[in-house]
Amino acid sequence: MTDDTQNIPIAKKRYTKAVATVWLVPLAALAAGVWLLASTIRERGPEITLALPDADGIQAGSTVIKLLNVDVGRVVRVSLNDTHNGVILKARMDKSAAKLLTDETQFWLVKPRIDRKGVTGLGTLVSGYYIEMSPGKKGNAKRDFTVIDAMPSDLSTTGGKHFQLVGEPDGALLSVGSSVLYRNIEVGEVAHAHFNPQENTVSYRIFIKHPNDVLVGENTQFWSAGGLNVDFSGGTLNVAAPPVGAILSGGAIEFDNPQVIGKGAEVDENKKFILHKNAHAIEHKTPENALKLVAFFDQSVASLQKGSPVVYKGITVGYVENPQFFYSKYKSKLFDNKNIPVLFYLSPELFGENTDIKEWQKSIDKTDLVEILHRGNPIVL
């Protein structure tokens, strides 16, 4: 009997490495997700930081940033700043807006408001507040900004100049957009306002539109014009007030040039000036050809102050420079006869004359000067 099993071939085992088709779908989804993430990162614009006093009307994920009424960014996070006295917004900008973010870029909050310009921002009652952007056309790239309260006035296409004003606080701090007046005519606006508690000073950056910027010179004087100015000089009541719109909007800044010496030389952009509390607090700059005199009064001089006018036959001819001129030379007279020395000056230009000061002084010396001082009145010659 033949053993047939010897002729049967022996089977060989072979192992193959195969990937189950069930894994192809999640792998494809993962690849697509990685591609979309990389594409999103590549197309995503920069993140910027915006500082505000508070977050009124701002919502993360909803508040947008607009340029020419086109959305170019969105607020993604709202938080307190490090000192807890303001808020910090993180906003994601479109890639197309990245090159517009420079140190000249400005942002401001658009919301409903009523001011001297009328009613604006009514559309935000429905759409919600948003942040408007003014692109920087040049300058260095920047990612940290401060959001101002209203559209800056210096976006005017007519041109003009900025000036810096610093003074002591006098009432409420003026808001951005408050009027800058020249003889009650609006010629500019407040572009920035700041209070320094350490130095107890207020500072303003104002913008005066062209061609009105030529009115400002090195001798120009600025003062706060927030209400009525009452003056009893010369025995008459004079009341001056800014326009009604300026009063309703919280005040204004006014400026003018000295009558005698004029505005002076032209000044450059960002020239710094002193901001006086009111028109009466302005320090009159003494002309170079002025004649300084000392008058002694045996009455009270409590009503006199620096800048009080000197009147001759109803015409202002000079100003008080020091109402209590206790110079060592005159101290003895104060105790001898109780007279109070007052230093004042007379200006030839105010007399309508521009002669040599020595010749002019001779004519003054021959004038019969009668010193009369009444409470509330200027020095009357």
Image (cartoon, helix red, strand yellow):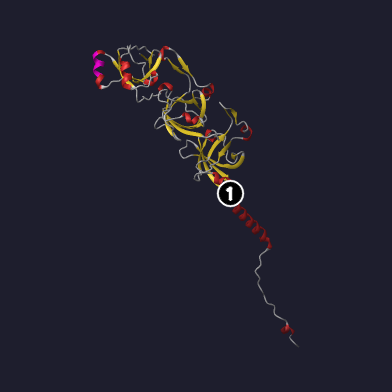
The answer to whether residue 381 is above or below residue 77 is above
Q: Is residue 41 left or right of residue 259?
A: right
Q: Is residue 214 left or right of residue 10?
A: left
Type of amino acid under label 1: Arg
Residue in front for this viewpoint, 249 or 82? 249
Residue in front for this viewpoint, 352 or 220? 352
**Quadrant of res 312:** top left
Residue for badge 1: 44
Quadrant housing the C terminus? top left
Residue in front for this viewpoint, 100 or 13? 100
**Tag 1, which secondary structure?**
strand
Question: Looking at this rendering, what residue extends furthest in the right direction?
Answer: 1
Q: Residue at x 63, y 57 (%)?
A: 31
Magenta stretch containing residue 36, yes or no?
Answer: no
The spot of residue 221 in percent (x, y) is: 43, 26
Confirm whether residue 342 shows in the render: no
Disc 1: CA contacts within 10 A as few (<14), some (14-19) or many (>=20): some
Task: Report the predominant secondary structure element of the magenta stretch.
Answer: helix
Question: Looking at this rendering, what residue extends furthest in the bottom direction?
Answer: 1
Q: Residue at x 64, y 59 (%)?
A: 27
The spot of residue 101 in percent (x, y) is: 53, 44
The spot of residue 343 in percent (x, y) is: 32, 20
Q: Residue at x 58, y 49 (%)?
A: 44
The spot of residue 188 in percent (x, y) is: 51, 29
**Quadrant of res 70:** top right
**Quadrant of res 11:** bottom right
| Residues drawn in magenta | 331-336
